[in-house]
Image (cartoon, helix red, strand yellow):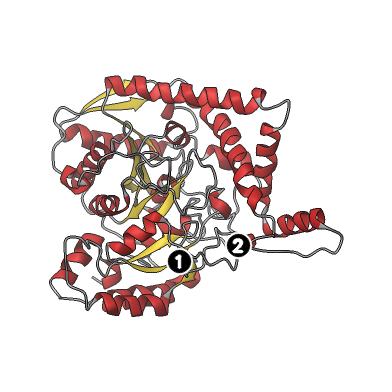
Amino acid sequence: MELYDLSIARCRKLLEEREVTSREVTASVLGRIERVEGSVRSFITVNAEEALNDAALKDKEEQSPEKPLLGVPLAVKDIICTKGLRTTCGSRILEGFVPPFDATCVARLRSAGAVIIGKTNLDEFAMGSSTENSGFFPTKNPWDLNRVPGGSSGGSAAAVAAGECIGSLGTDTGGSIRQPASHCGVVGLKPTYGRVSRYGLVAFASSLDQAGPITKDVLDAAILMNVISGHDPKDSTCAPVEVPDFTESLIPGLGGLKVGLPREYFGEGVDPEVAGLVRRAVEMLKDAGAEVKEVSLPHTDYAVAAYYIIAPAEASSNLARYDGVRYGLRVDEDRGLREMYEATRAKGFGAEVKRRIVLGTYALSSGYYDAYYRKASQVRTLVLNDFKEAFKEVDIIAAPVAPTPAFKLGELVDDPLTMYLSDVFTLPGSLAGIPGISIPAGFTSRGLPVGVQILGPHFGEEVILKAAYNVELARGDLGKAPEL
């Protein structure tokens, strides 16, 4: 096994036993990036020299339980602020922006001893489901370079799958951790809204955005959750709840656990191979001792419409700050301030971001607020209540992550509505603010990865991690890696 193939847990064990050094692991990862990045295009910025220097310093530090990531090279989605390291949000409008501070989740990674290897590509301002909306270049799926890696955290998921980092952070607004994790055959966990601080996470939709881990296995996801979770006074939406040791929930056996299968998630439009692999994963849960029953989430069909009013409305407000005055791109116009605003935003934002700003501004405009935004917010409450009712009957919900495996590059880029529908099974959980994890369930006949999504009640990360771990145990090693 090459060092870049290590999991976080295995890497830490080897580092603790002094069998390898952080500099050796970091050099292995950087070498892998150099060899495959031309094909995959996972990174916007590679922090090579600084990462090697940081790794050498980590090798001089004493091992301690307070630094569970000491010397482990990780990647960070390029919408999360990193002090002294360029943060572009995948947008030309922030192409040269270097934050003067770390996001709280990054600061916690650094405090735990992690080495930041670079910043990964994404759909511009996290608006997309394929990483084709990046302002720089599309990322490709390591399993099939003609297909998308998913989005918007496609760079983070592809980097983990391709061995270009030991683990990574992504963000999830409507499925942007879970969907690319499914398409790239890795583990991705969206925490409960409020479990992880949003301070320093550049805002797309403030009531939905959440940072979380994308890793090679469930244990690694639990390890990163231990580090990044917890109350932060800098974020008023970050909940003051106790952070358990998530790794302690990873035990075999699911006796007494009740699993719900939502009938609305297995209907028309779901690829038969996807449905079959998800049902096989559910059988694994059953074999581990869980009881399986059908449940209903009756407002599922309205989630996409509600999301694409709420999220663009919040984006319209959040992106108003990019005006060319204080930071970021500025296109000077001699005609006046308004013209400078218009020229800067016209050149700096891509087509999808402009589309969502227009949608959101319209939904919030005078005379339309009640008809659109207020109504969408009421539908959001109905979606939340669906989950609350379901969790009175079951402990977790198992479902597909996406209706299909990864689609081809360019296939849906001119069809935004169909692209939006690819998130139909992740959006409801995001609107409800509940945690969800995608874990590899197997491969289609074409060799494309498919994930199963496990959703839990608010602050139910322990139970979904336990269920995912048992799927992983039953599934075993899937037996192959991307051929790059």
Left or right: where 246 falls relative to 335: left
Name the residue furthest front. Answer: 233
**Residue that appears at 58% across and 40% down:** 314
Which residue bears the numbered disc 1?
83
Residue 68 screen position, x and y as percent = 22, 61
The quadrant holding residue 62 is: bottom left
Figure quadrant of the N terminus:
bottom left
User: Can the viewer see residue 444?
Assistant: no
Residue 356 screen position, x and y as percent = 64, 43
Which residue bears the numbered disc 2?
94
**Residue that appears at 48% across and 40% down:** 174
Which type of secondary structure does the marked residue at label 2 adopt?
Answer: helix
Going by the numbered disc 1, the residue's amino acid type is: Lys
Left or right: where 402 falls relative to 246: right
Comes first in the chain, label 2 or label 1: 1
Front: mark 2 or 1: 1
User: Can the viewer see residue 190?
Assistant: yes
Going by the numbered disc 2, the residue's amino acid type is: Leu
| Cα distance in 3D space between marks 2 and 1 | 15 Å
Q: Is residue 195 above or below residue 134?
A: above
Q: Is residue 392 above or below residue 359?
A: above
Q: Nearer the viewer, residue 224 or 480?
A: 224
Q: Nearer the viewer, residue 344 or 285?
A: 344
Residue 359 screen position, x and y as percent = 67, 38
Query: Dot 2, how many residues are within 10 Å of its Cα: few (below 14), some (14-19), or many (20+)?
Result: many
**Residue that appears at 47% across and 49% down:** 406
Q: Nearer the viewer, residue 66 or 251?
A: 66
Q: Nearer the viewer, residue 461 or 335?
A: 335
The quadrant holding residue 420 is: top right
Residue 321 screen position, x and y as percent = 64, 51
Left or right: where 362 falls relative to 293: right
Left or right: where 122 falls relative to 292: right
